[in-house]
Amino acid sequence: MKTLTNNLRLFWQGAILSYVALFHWMRPIQYAASKILMPLAQMFFFVYLGTFATGKDNATFYIIGNALQIAAVSGIYGMSMSIGGDRDNGTLGYIFGTPANRLVVFMGRAFMNIMDGALGVVIAFIWGVILMGLDLSHTSIPALALIILITTISTCGLGLLLGCLALITANVMFVNNFVYFLLLIFSGANLPLEELPVWVQAVSYILPLTRGITAARELVGGASLTEISPLLWGELTVGLVYFVLGYFLFKAFEIVAKRRGTLEVF
Amino acid sequence: MNIRTLIKYWRTILLVAEMNIRQQMTDGFILFTVLFQPIIIALLGLWMLKDKGPDAAMFVVVGSGLTGLWSSLLFISGGSLNFERWSGTLESLVAVPTPFEVIVFGKNLGNVVQSLISMVLGYFVAAFAFGYSLEIQQPLLFVASVFLSVIAFISFGLIIAPIFVMNPGVRAWQNAMEFPVYVLCGFLFPIALLPGWTSPISYLLPPYWAAVALHGTSTTNASLNQTLFAWGMLLLFSLLDLIIASRLFKVMLYKARADATLGME
């Protein structure tokens, strides 16, 4: 019982502190800019580009795709900086030196980014409704919320894996940016997947976001939660696979770093 | 200022630009901003606009190059003084006899010129990945437009850098400033699609006039008068930016010396 209590405390403290540490350098207004203005501007750009290319009737396609893509901001950047930041700030050694349960530490890092990412997507959908005419009047909002949550979790799974890569490379922002922008193509946020080459489609389905975006489009198009549930299970599975891969990479890195004495060597 | 001094400054500008490019080619973040991000945007744009024909493809090639120019200006030129600050070289640069603005001009020149590579790469992506045979319709006017755009971007960068140095809070808005300019300046779609009230904002942004000149001369969409007007606006904004930047640099250096905070954020 005591171990469970300790782990819960570790999880919660880790979640709060890693999140505060990540945004401590921002004032509330700057945080708001990164949560509200940046996603809005990115959405506007791709929605206008999409409607310029294919007509105003297809605006919903781009609004939904790019609203869910916002999950990758917290999922990719937030997660990888939460993990990689320990190395940059010289605190990685302390984490490896504690007897704390690594899985709990790991999940604590993810929790607030999942919440933050989901909030970002909700804000993006609100922008979509208010400013871009997205019609959600016939959409089940709880079902949409579930899609947002699952998609954010799966995206954070990928972010966790990238965060572990941040522990072994100095060019973490290159990797993060590259993955983030590739997701704009491969997730189907801006292109119908069926129009893409087969190999692109194959890659798309091993990435997070893809099924979540498809599920959200189908839900807004009139499908029921039961009809899109296979997509949601798939999205969740993809995310969990990335979480597991990230966790084992973290463990492997710890062992190698301790053996070689390269804990904070870039 | 005599000719000898001007030549000396020009040599400094070229040398700083060269060193800047060499140094930045080893930085993953910069490589991404200058090369990979515009190419990904070009791929996306070319695919999305593939049914609109070669003119749209040329529009995407030029537009994606402009996104590279703006992102480079915002993130790299905007942060270049802070980079010197973190490296401990800012004090030395300020102390050398060459005016600090001349050095920063050289840094911005390096940034903008290396960003032009993205336009060339976008062209090759369009040609090889999508099979377009693209031709710049008004080559001489296009080259002149590139030259004037480079000057306008450098001058605009001279304003951004001291503002970011003097106001670290503004720098935190960098991420939020990238896409609005893509949208407002019509890099990849005409601003006619946007609500009418946004047009005056677009007209106040030098990258918008660069987009008008480059899009217009790479295709046959712009008349000579329209191109000349865009050039005039680029020159006007360059001049205004240089005047404002000169004042900003004086304020920044005075403030840094008076407060003894040159190396501190």
Image: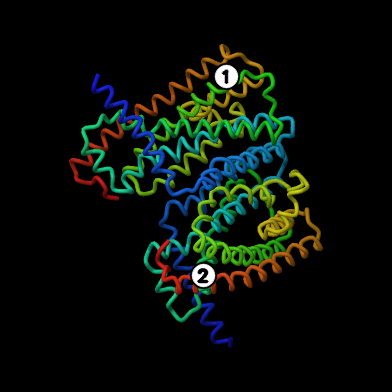
Q: Quadrant of residue A160?
A: top left
Q: Give, as a three-letter code, the residue at label 1.
A: Pro
Residue at point 60%, 47% (across, down): B179
| Residue at image coords 54%, 70% | B105
Residue at the far left in the pictured view = A259
Residue assigned mark 1: A142
Q: Position of residue A224 (x, y in %)?
A: 61, 13
Q: Is residue A147 visible?
A: yes
Residue closer to the observer: A80 or B146 = A80
Residue located at (39% from left, 69% from top): B89
Closest to the observer: A23 or B200? A23
The answer to whether residue A129 is above or below residue B196 is above
Residue at (67, 24) in percent of width and height: A136
Marking on residue B42: none
Residue A227 drawn above or below residue B65: above
Write down the chain letter for disc 2. Answer: B
Of A101 and B241, the residue lying toward us: A101
Q: Quadrant of the N terminus of chain B?
A: bottom right
Q: Secondary structure at mark 2?
A: helix
- Among the 4 quarters of the image, the one containing residue A191: top right
Residue type at mark 2 is: Met
Q: Which residue is mark 2?
A: B252
Residue B47: image location, x then y, percent: 63, 38
Q: Quadrant of the C terminus of chain B?
A: bottom left
Q: Position of residue A26 (x, y in %)?
A: 47, 48
**Other residues around mark 1 within 10 Å, as few (<14) / some (14–19) / many (≥20):** few
Instruction: Determine the chain carrying the residue at label 1.
Output: A
